[in-house]
Image (cartoon, coloured by chain):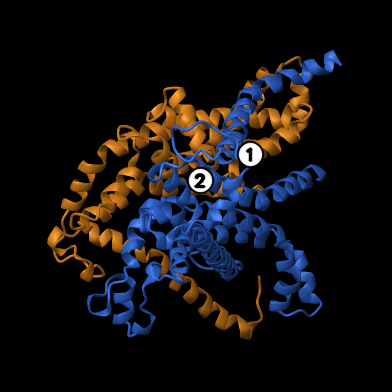
Chain colours: A blue, B orange
Amino acid sequence: MTRRARTWLPGLLLVLPSIVAIGVFVYGLIFWNTRVAVSGRHDEVSPYRFDRGRNFADLWDQPSWPGAVRHALLFTVVFVLGALLLGAFLAFLMDKGIRGEASFRAVYLFPMAISFIACGVVWRWLMNPAPPERAVGLNQLFGELRLGALANGWWQDPDWGMAAMALPAVWQMSGYVMALYLAGFRSVPEELREAARVDGASEWKVYRHVVFPQLRPVTLSALIILGHISLKVFDLIMAIAGKQIITYVPAIATYVEVFDRHDPANGATIATYLLLAVALLVVPYLVWSVRAERAR
Amino acid sequence: MTAPAGAGRTARIVRPAVLLLFAVLFLMPVYVLVVTSFKPLQEADPGSAWNLPAHWSTSGWSAAWDTLRPGLENSVKIAVSGSLISAVLGSLNGYVLSKWRFPGADAVFTLLLFGMFIPYQAVMIPLAGLLTDMELAGTIRGLVLAHVVYGIPICTLIFRNYYVTIPDELIEAARVDGAGMLRTYRSIVLPVSAPAFAVTLIWQFTSIWNDFLFAVFLGAPGSWPVTVMLNNTAGSGAVAVQYDQQMASALLASLPTLLVYLLLGRFFMRGLMAGALKG
């Protein structure tokens, strides 16, 4: 036992600083945040007093909160589906190799290197909702292309604005999905495709029955990554709309509650909801993928 | 690779055409950024932003440079030191978790990984308090600390995924020869680690450079990186927006990461793939 321990103990010691850091900064602070959430500490001076998590229910009575949840859901649906479908479609078109493939890939991927803040600067302008006679950005372009009917209020539309807000996010992330799918497509052995062709399958059927089923893990990874980015979206909205109610989402709400309304309990409660949403998505996936890898 | 002749012909034309269309759409925002940034102020009017500049001017760029310089300096300090420390930690962790495992290593790894996905909002309020207690609030060192700590999961993952490809026999042979853990790391693992270091450094540099949330929650005017400064210059509604300067600022703030991407795109790609767990 001691001799065995001597072989692995140094390893544990080497990783220990990281374990402690993550223990404190991730799990310890999550615990602390939850304490603030259930403390009902609605200003910065009163003591922490346990209020049985009343806050978690009370939040729903606040006028801005249900809207924030609705905004986040709409944004998530458009962003995740948009980036997933566009990325998969681009990868599908490139799968068989195409002239200038490297350049296409570089173009689709470069937005990922740019910060959401810089992205916001240009998209805020592109999605400027000025009326037709003073139209700028995309609305002006639509006008010149005689597609004026497409002009709209973009993110300032009270009902569908968050769908427009998802466009810059799709612009940034669909290249990433493209790269994932392209790697996935290319990892399907050519023999498998060939075998299906020999059996008389059309090219579409080869994809439908051979290639796509092999890509489920890629789709799952992409969904998890896009989903958690979407729930956390903060920079992009801050850069385009700031803290306006029309684009209010939980990630912004935390900031507003803490810094503008000086209400730590509300901020912490929202943050806890956010964490729960991400955990529901990510934890089963992590457990599954670490286990699957061990099994190999 | 060989497609049926009839269907192949349309595919040969349609496919590149669609790809080209999307490439144009993807580049559109960049076109606007570039042309507007080179217009003189009086020309940088939103109504004509799709036009090429009638007179080329770099006044927007020099104004952007003057405004953003402190932020750029802060960003360089934070991103360079943050990514270097992250890479070293990631390398050691990845080595132990793949080649010098201890009981419960899988559980530790899974718990570490979850740190990669947490919404930072869920730790931000106590983190700000903790950094204040440590007298690091609003400092560059505080921001570096935050980036390093929350970068541990992804950096460990990248190195671990890379090191599992080193044959166990090599490690065993070193052990048999009496080499200890650190000795084995130095003589066998470290010499082949260059690609993983490249991936990690690029990944961390890009994400630290582009960070806004930590900076705005934990930073102070003296430690603000360029993203915060960019957002501040772009966001003030009181004065008339100087589009030339604004667009030049956005480009200027993106140049370092764009250059990294253009010059080292191959490693950037691998970092992306590592982020998806399955490399």
- On screen, B123 above or below A107? above
Q: Secondary structure at mark 1?
A: helix
The answer to whether residue A168 is seen in the rendering is yes
Question: Which chain is mark 1 on?
Answer: B
What residue lies at 71% left-to-right and 16% top-to-bottom? B180
Q: Which residue is mark 1?
A: B157
Image quadrant where one finds the N terminus of chain B: bottom right
Q: Is residue B165 visible?
A: no
Front residue of this view, candidates A58 and B111 = A58
Work out whether A76 lies above or below B70: below
Q: Which mark is residue A198?
A: none
Residue A51 pos. (x, y %)? 60, 40
Residue at mark 1 to residue at mark 2: CA–CA distance: 34 Å
Q: Nearer the viewer, mark 1 or mark 2?
A: 2
Secondary structure at badge 2 equals helix
- Do pointers 1 and 2 mark residues of a single chain? no
The spot of residue B206 in percent (x, y) is 45, 43
Q: Residue at x 53, y 67 (%)?
A: A78
> Mark 1 Cα within 10 Å, few/some/many (few <14, many 20+)?
many
Q: Position of residue B176 (x, y in %)?
A: 79, 18
Q: Position of residue A55 (x, y in %)?
A: 57, 47
Q: Name the residue located 34 percent from the left edge and 83 percent from the top edge.
A: A148
Whether residue B128 sits left or right of residue B255 in the image: it is right
Which residue bears the numbered disc 2? A266
Q: Residue at x 51, y 47 (%)?
A: B268
